[in-house]
Every structure is written in C-alpha cells, then in structure tokens.
Image: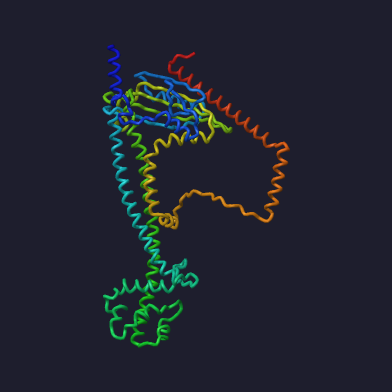
C-alpha cells in the first residue's frame, strides 16, 4: 500500500513538468516524425536502440555498442583513437557529420561558452543592422532606376541613341510615337527648366502677352529632325517675325537641353546601375560574414537537452554528441559505410592552458560509442548528409530567405537590373511539353511502328539478358561492400576493446 502511494507521487511529478520533457516546452520527435524524416530522404526502415525505441538512424546491417566510463579518462582520446585507426590504419575517408553539446546552466563550462557566444552575437547584430539598412536603400535605388528608365524612354522614342563611343546618334527606325514623346519632353522642359506659367519669360508666360498667344501651339507643333536647321524650319512658318524670333530662341534652348540631359541621364543611369550592383554585392558579403558567426553561436549555445536526466543544472556536467561518416574508395556502385556516434556524459574540468593563458575544459566521464555498418550508393550517402545538414540550416536559410523575399518583392525589375550589371542568377529550367507536330508521313510511320511492336512480341529480346546481368553485378557489388564494412567495423571494435582493457574473446 505504501509502495502504491509512492508510485502515485512519482507519476504526479512526472506528469507535472518535472520529468516529462514535452510538458516543459521541449518537443521531442515522435516515432512517426522520425519515420517521416527518414522516408523523405529515401531510408525506409529506422534503427532501434537497446530499449527497442526508434532512433533517427537508418537500419544498419550490423551494429556494435560500447560503454566506457572512467572519471580519470580523457574522452578526447576515445574519439581520436577511433578516428586515427580508421583514417590512418585502414585508409578510410572520414567526414564529421554532427558535433553538438549541452552544458548545465550553473557550470563553469556553460559560463565560458556563453561569454564567447555574446561576443559573436554583438557582431551578428551589427552586421544584421547594416543588412537591414542597405536592403531598405535597395528599394530606393530600384525606384530611381525605374524613374530614369521612364525618362530615358521619352528620348529614345524620338530616335535618339548613344553609340559605343558615347556620341549621340539618331535612328529613325527606332522611333516609337516620336511626336507624343517630343511633346512630353517639351512639357518637362517648360515645367522644370523655365518654371511653367509662373515665369513671365517662359512659353506659357509669354502666351499671356498680346501677340504671343500662338507661341505655345507653335512650340509644341514644330519638331526639328536630325540634320534640319531650326532657322529654316521656323522661317517656313508665316507668322509675326517677333513671334518667330522668340520661337527660334525657345527651340534652340530646348534642343540643346535635350541633348545634354540625355547624355547626363545615360551617365547617371550607368552610375546608379553599378552602384545597385555594388549595393547588392555588399549585402551578400555581409551575409557571408554573418553565416560563420551564426554557426558558431548555434554551436556555443549547445543543444536543448535540459530534459535529459544525465544533465543536472547544479552539477558541473555537460553532454557531447559527435558523429562521423567513414567511407572506403571503391569503383563499384555500392560503397562500404560506417557511421560512428559518440554520446558523452562528461564532467568538464576547467584548466588553464599555457598558451594564451586561457581557460578551457578537459572532459572526463562516460562515453557510449555506437557503430553502424551500411552499404550505400553515392546518392544515399549524399541524402544522409543532407538530412543531417538540414537540421542546422534553419537560421542560415532564414537569413538567405529574407534577402530572397526582398528581391522577390521588387519583382523582376531588380533581377533584370542586376543581370544588366553582370550579376548571374541560377534559374531552374522548366521543361514544357509541346504537342508533337504530325508530318505527312506520320500515319505511315505509326503503322510501321505498330508492326515492329507486334513482331517484337514473338522475337526474343536481348535487352532482358543485359538487365539480368546488371542486376546480378549490382547484387555482387552490394555484397562485397557489405562484407568490407562488416569486416572493418569488427576490426575497429575489436582493436578498440583490446587497447582500452575491455573484456575480449
């Protein structure tokens, strides 16, 4: 009866945020989520631990598990012994897949890592502010480019262009609504240069005077083409000589302004376009600088494992998890693969290093080493690396996504301007399925093809024999790679036990 009461108290505390990690705000992956994660990357069956619980690893061919606990044992030696044995003695290629840790909140190790993280967080905050300000300016630059293109289009619609040497030329073939564009430019000149009707000496201001009422109509209707003389064009008009004199002066001022402003706008557009490219490259440079800091900060913050019963806040403890992927260079399709996972429960002792007089942890404690053997193709190895890499890419992708969102919000204009400035973008090619055009011989070709299919049903096919041979060869390659992986993993497991005083047989 007394035992039942204690059991009820235990269940009560377990369900009220003391032991249950889910209720403490830490969401652990369920078995369905682990299966879905593995299936998304092409791994059908998950692995299980010694308690028959599903773990986020593909099911191996064979698995070995070692537990080493000694409080006077430096755990770095356990890692580097296996790493050196695989890399140097067996000549396998080794890649680090996972390197994470968690520390107790009251430990000295946690304090040192947080100090280092705070210094890098300040740098990240400064660079992020620069990126935010420059992204805001990016919108203004695109708007300025849009206004310049609109103004330049009025000039170019009248046939005005700049050649490669920077000389102004006129091409009648490139005229698009030349009269309306000329009227628009003349209106801009009167409003911006002459000051509009407020200036008594402007075209609109003189129209108020007696005898000059016709001046705006003559000014807007008279268009001087390339090679024509303003004096001759105006003298052909039969009006008051004083009005024609003023018209000559206004047309001369306008066409001089038109040539100079067109060259100025083209130069300004070129400068703004280069500045836009420089602005965009600067933002990308800042993001490239931010990414290493974010990776380091993420690592220094450790993994959220406060729910783990091995990590007590008041103790000097930490948890370290390391994973490496070892492969053997073979020419066959299937390659032998060994995954080795270290799970350390450590007591870091802070010690001073002679070089630089800096404090650093020396980890001692318990180590669980799990070895898994696989026979994978290059594609499967790549998928497994992507699965592990995607777990730590959330922050980095959010930074890239923010810049991508800003670019997408500006539409295709920014991309077109950047392409014009020399920036390259990788675009996905979309294959469009077009209906096949039928020629004159298409019905006869279909009949011949049909007879070929009927005859092929009675004749033996040689391709099937090749497929059987290829499948047989693939199975042989897979069998050889499995044998190599099992043999090497057994040797590493056996040699490690012998060198560290484990019981062997």
Q: Is residue 311 above or below residue 193?
A: above
Pinpoint residue 468: horizontal percent, then vertical percent: 65, 32
Position of the N terminus by quadrant: top left
- Horizontal arrangement in the rendering, residue 480 relative to residue 31 (left or right): right
- Can I make out residue 168 in this image? no
- Can I make out residue 98 in this image? yes
Pinpoint residue 443: horizontal percent, then vertical percent: 68, 52
Front position in the image: 171 or 448:
448
Q: Is residue 88 above or below residue 240?
A: above
The answer to which quarter of the image holds residue 187 is bottom left
The answer to which quarter of the image holds residue 239 is bottom left
Pinpoint residue 91: horizontal percent, then vertical percent: 51, 28
- Horizontal arrangement in the rendering, residue 49 relative to residue 431 (left or right): left
Front position in the image: 356 or 360:
360
Residue drawn at 31 percent across, 49 percent down? 130
Residue drawn at 40 percent across, 79 percent down? 222
Front position in the image: 401 or 126:
401
Q: Is residue 31 above or below residue 256?
A: above
Q: Is residue 319 above or below residue 169?
A: above
Colour scheme shown: rainbow
Pinpoint residue 227: horizontal percent, then vertical percent: 46, 78
Residue drawn at 52 percent across, 36 percent down? 379
Number of marks in the rendered image: 0
């Amino acid at each position: 009866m007394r035992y039942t009461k204690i059991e009820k108290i235990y269940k009560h505390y377990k369900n009220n945020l003391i032991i249950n990690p889910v209720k403490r705000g830490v969401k652990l992956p369920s078995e369905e989520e682990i299966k879905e994660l593995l299936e998304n990357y092409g791994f059908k069956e998950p692995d299980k631990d010694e308690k028959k619980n599903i773990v986020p690893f593909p099911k191996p061919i064979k698995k070995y598990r070692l537990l080493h606990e000694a409080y006077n044992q430096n755990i770095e030696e356990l890692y580097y012994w296996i790493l050196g044995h695989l890399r140097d003695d067996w000549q396998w290629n080794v890649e680090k897949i996972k390197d994470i840790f968690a520390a107790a909140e009251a430990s000295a190790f946690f304090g040192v890592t947080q100090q280092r993280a705070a210094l890098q967080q300040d740098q990240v905050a400064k660079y992020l502010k620069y990126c935010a300000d420059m992204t805001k300016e990016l919108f203004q630059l695109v708007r300025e480019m849009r206004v310049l293109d609109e103004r330049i289009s009025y000039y170019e619609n009248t046939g005005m262009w700049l050649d490669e040497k920077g000389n102004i030329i006129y091409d009648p073939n490139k005229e698009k609504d030349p009269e309306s564009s000329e009227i628009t430019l003349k209106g801009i000149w009167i409003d911006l240069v002459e000051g509009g009707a407020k200036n008594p000496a402007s075209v609109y201001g003189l129209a108020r005077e007696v005898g000059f009422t016709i001046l705006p109509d003559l000014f807007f209707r008279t268009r001087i083409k390339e090679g024509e003389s303003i004096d001759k064009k105006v003298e052909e008009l039969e009006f008051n000589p004083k009005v024609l004199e003023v018209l000559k002066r206004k047309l001369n001022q306008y066409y001089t302004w038109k040539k100079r402003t067109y060259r100025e706008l083209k130069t300004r557009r070129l400068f703004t376009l280069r500045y836009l490219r420089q602005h965009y490259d600067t933002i990308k440079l800042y993001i490239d600088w931010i990414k290493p800091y974010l990776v380091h900060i993420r690592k220094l913050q450790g993994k959220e494992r406060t729910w783990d019963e091995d990590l007590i806040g008041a103790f000097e403890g930490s948890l370290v998890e390391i994973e490496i992927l070892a492969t053997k260079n073979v020419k066959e399709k299937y390659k032998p693969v060994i995954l080795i996972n270290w799970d350390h429960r450590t007591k870091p002792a802070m010690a001073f290093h002679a070089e630089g007089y800096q404090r650093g942890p020396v980890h001692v404690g318990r180590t669980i080493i799990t070895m898994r053997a696989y026979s994978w193709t290059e594609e499967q190895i790549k998928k497994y690396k992507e699965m592990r890499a995607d777990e730590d890419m959330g922050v980095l992708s959010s930074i890239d996504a923010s810049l991508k969102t800003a670019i997408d919000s500006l539409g295709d204009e920014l991309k077109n301007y950047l392409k014009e400035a020399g920036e390259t973008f990788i675009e996905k090619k979309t294959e469009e399925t077009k209906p096949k055009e039928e020629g004159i011989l298409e019905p006869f070709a279909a009949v011949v093809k049909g007879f070929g299919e009927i005859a092929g049903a009675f004749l033996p096919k040689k391709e099937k024999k090749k497929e059987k041979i290829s499948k047989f060869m693939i199975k042989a390659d897979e069998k050889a790679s499995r044998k190599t992986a099992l043999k090497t993993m057994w040797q590493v497991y056996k040699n490690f036990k012998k060198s560290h005083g484990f019981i062997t047989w």
